[in-house]
Amino acid sequence: MTSKKESALDLSKFIDKGVRVKLAGGREVSGVLKGYDQLLNLVLDEALEYLRDPLDPTQLTDKTRSLGLVVCRGTAVMLVAPTAGMVLLKNNPFLEGEAAEAE
């Protein structure tokens, strides 16, 4: 009896659509998903890398760098999300607590 291995993610619905990928090490890239395999190696076209703040590497800046066609190795892929309908929320409960303490 032969069983076909299946990936935990079904990325077929994202082919030729915009995705945002978070990679190990903190890099974030967005582009059009052109292909993938069962090891989660991704091929992105028209890729943009979101640059980090040099003073605070945990924060993304508004600056981007055009990468073109990119292959993301599956072992480095941490998150794949569609860009359609993506909204950045300002949610930092720690700032509210610090502001309350300052008053």
Image (spheres, helix red, strand yellow):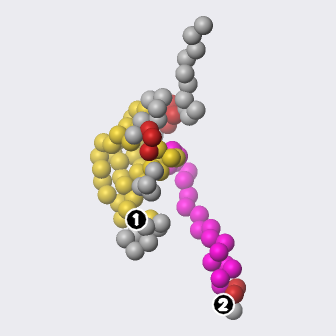
Q: Is residue 87 magenta?
A: yes
Tell me: 48 left or right of 26.
Answer: left
Quadrant showing the N terminus: top right
Residue 83 covered by magenta stretch: yes
Q: Position of residue 84 (x, y in %)?
A: 52, 48
Write the start and end of the magenta stretch as one range. 80-99
Quarter of image, res 33: top left
Give the position of the C terminus as an image quadrant. bottom right
Q: Which residue is mark 2?
A: 102
Q: Residue furthest bottom?
A: 103
> Would you identify the image quadrant in which residue 71 lies?
top left
Q: Residue 17 appears at what percent x and percent y?
A: 45, 40
Q: Which residue corresponds to mark 1?
A: 52
Q: Residue at x 65, y 84 (%)?
A: 99
- Eyeballing the image, is 102 above or below 74? below
- The amino acid on which the numbered mark 2 sits, given as a three-letter code, is Ala
